[in-house]
């Protein structure tokens, strides 16, 4: 369409959009010459994000609501069948009808073993077509689900806008991209910018054909280092890519400047020790500027922790996708190619001072974890974030905690559960807890502090909801 035709359509749309739903058929009546409804519809679609228009099921367009997206219970037990079918189509096209059998099945299994090993040992993975397919077969379902749990934390704070400009750096084959597209409601409007230099982008393009009408996709086949972002984004996502960047702090720092004032930077990494700890290192470097929204909320301003902090969240398992079952059948060890655990390290950072949880009450008597070494053998009050699920193997419950000032790791050990301290075990990952009369011990074997919760200890959990209670910040 020429520029003049496009201008004519868009000026009519702008005029009508606040009066009534935009019907491409009505617009056709106002246009000089015969453009055709299909072309008009496609012109509106191409400009829908800028116009702030959502396409409805009846083909009309309405302004996107300014209400934030409501949180919801994320109950993705399995990835949608349409994605399994699409992925199997791609595998069939590449390897033939019986892709999971014989030589091709062996190639896929070998590639999955290779990427798992390279990743585990911190070596770069080259995402050629076969590695990208192997990655999709093994990792796509878990990351599709994990990102939905993480996004829900933003909507729980009432902070997920219905019109979202998203930048997904190292988008890969699109697990998180599809997870986000499916998480957002039909009346939300998204401009999804995927930065992906490798052949994984070809798979992303195919799988994203299944996305909803209001997710407008742009794929940038460039590296994070070369790509020049434009404008600001409501979400900048680095999912499972930090460990593949040569200089992750400088790259994440560069992109942090493009997070909007009310937007969020989401960092995600596999729960493995190396990748999870590396994520915390990047988070800590960036948090000298940005504020951690969840989980490792800094409870004492001006402090940066330097503990190891192998922290990740364990989310509910998913059902085995059909393609993983087929690949696994040909393997020697049952379950080697099945990946249904959903557990990731993540951080959400923001420019504003919002946090997902608040302090519970008066913390003026609390000791900072950076000073805990001076209280060994004593009982103290602390205010901390719960940073793990129960790590014990059948003995006393054990939880990693932090307050943003810790120099080494601190673990809560529950030796006697009572109604007054039960909330420690029950609180969700990332929740702030105020613990009174915890006994401080030094654990020589683990080079960490054990904070003993017993019958004298009481625990109160922090409130959920956006906003920091500045009055209780004691620093
Ligand atoms: C482990 S995959 C993660 C893909 C996707 N984000 C996910 O969570 O499933 C890492 C991706 O980052 C991409 N990548 C690696 N180095 C990159 C760089 N310098 N810039 C942009 N992307 C990069 C790779 O090509 C690969 O697709």
Image (cartoon, helix red, strand yellow):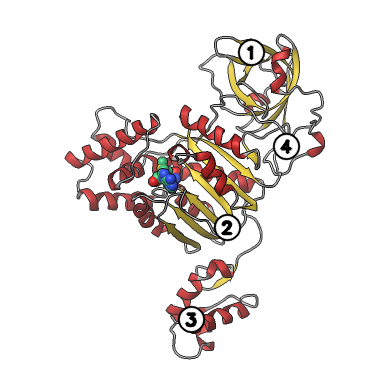
Residue count near mark 1 (Cα–Cα under 10 Å), binned few <14, some 14–19, many ≥20: some
In the rendered image, residue 267, in percent from the top left (x then y), is placed at 53, 41
What residue appears at the point 31 percent right and 38 percent down from the top-left corner?
Answer: 325
Q: Which residue is mark 4?
A: 358
User: Quick check: 167 left or right of 197?
Assistant: right
Kindly check if marks 1 and 2 are in contact, taking CB atoms under 8 A apart as contact: no
CA separation, marks 4 and 1?
27 Å
Q: Is residue 323 left or right of residue 296?
A: left
**Is residue 59 visible to us here?**
no
In space, the residues marked 2 and 3 are separated at their CA atoms by 27 Å
Q: Quadrant of the N terminus?
A: bottom left
Q: Ligand 1, what quadrant?
A: top left
User: Quick one: label 2 or label 4, which is nearer the N terminus?
Assistant: 2
What residue is at 78 percent from the left and 39 percent from the top? Answer: 469
Q: Looking at the image, is 365 positioned above or below residue 34?
A: above
Q: Which residue is mark 3?
A: 3
The residue beneath circle 2 is 164
Residue receiving disc 1: 415
* Residue at the spot 35% in from the left edge and 57% down from the top edge: 206
Element under label 2? strand
């Amino acid at each position: 369409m020429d520029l003049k035709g496009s201008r004519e359509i868009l000026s009519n749309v702008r005029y009508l959009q606040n009066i009534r739903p935009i019907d491409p058929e009505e617009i056709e009546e106002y246009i000089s010459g015969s453009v055709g409804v299909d072309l008009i519809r496609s012109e509106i679609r191409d400009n829908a994000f800028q116009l702030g228009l959502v396409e409805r099921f009846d083909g009309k367009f309405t302004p996107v609501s300014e209400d934030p997206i409501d949180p919801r219970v994320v109950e993705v037990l399995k990835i949608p069948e349409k994605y399994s079918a699409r992925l199997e189509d791609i595998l069939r096209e590449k390897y033939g009808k019986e892709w999971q059998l014989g030589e091709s099945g062996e190639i896929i299994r070998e590639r999955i073993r290779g990427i798992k090993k390279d990743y585990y040992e911190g070596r770069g993975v080259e995402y050629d077509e076969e590695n990208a397919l192997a990655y999709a077969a093994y990792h796509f379902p878990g990351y599709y689900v994990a990102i939905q749990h993480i996004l829900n934390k933003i909507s729980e704070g009432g902070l997920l806008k219905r019109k979202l400009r998203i930048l997904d750096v190292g988008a890969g084959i699109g697990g998180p991209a599809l997870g986000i597209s499916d998480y957002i409601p039909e009346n939300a409007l998204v401009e999804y910018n995927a930065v992906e230099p490798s052949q994984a982008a070809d798979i992303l393009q195919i799988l994203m054909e299944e996305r909803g009408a209001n997710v407008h996709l742009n794929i940038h086949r460039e590296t994070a280092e070369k790509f020049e972002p434009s404008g600001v984004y409501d979400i900048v996502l680095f999912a499972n890519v930090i460990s593949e960047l040569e200089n992750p702090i400088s790259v994440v720092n560069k992109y942090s400047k493009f997070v909007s004032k009310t937007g969020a930077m989401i960092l995600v990494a596999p729960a493995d020790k190396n990748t999870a700890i590396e994520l915390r290192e990047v988070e800590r470097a960036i948090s000298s500027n940005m504020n951690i929204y969840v989980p490792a909320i800094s409870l004492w301003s001006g402090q940066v922790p330097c503990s190891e902090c192998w922290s990740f969240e364990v989310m509910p398992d998913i059902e085995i996708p059909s393609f993983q079952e087929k690949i696994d059948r040909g393997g020697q060890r049952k379950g080697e190619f099945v990946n249904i655990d959903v557990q990731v390290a993540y951080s959400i950072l923001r420019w504003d001072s919002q946090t997902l949880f608040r302090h519970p009450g008066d913390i003026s008597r609390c000791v900072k974890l950076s000073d805990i070494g001076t209280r060994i053998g004593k009982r103290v009050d602390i205010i901390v974030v719960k940073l793990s699920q129960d790590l014990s193997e059948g003995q006393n419950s054990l939880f990693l905690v932090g307050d943003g000032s810790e120099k080494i790791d601190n673990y809560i050990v529950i030796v006697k559960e009572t109604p007054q301290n039960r909330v420690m075990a029950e609180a969700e990952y990332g929740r702030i807890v105020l613990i009174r009369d915890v006994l401080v011990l030094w654990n020589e074997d683990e080079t960490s502090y054990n904070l003993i919760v017993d019958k004298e200890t009481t625990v109160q959990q922090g409130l959920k909801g956006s906003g920091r209670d500045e009055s209780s910040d004691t620093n």
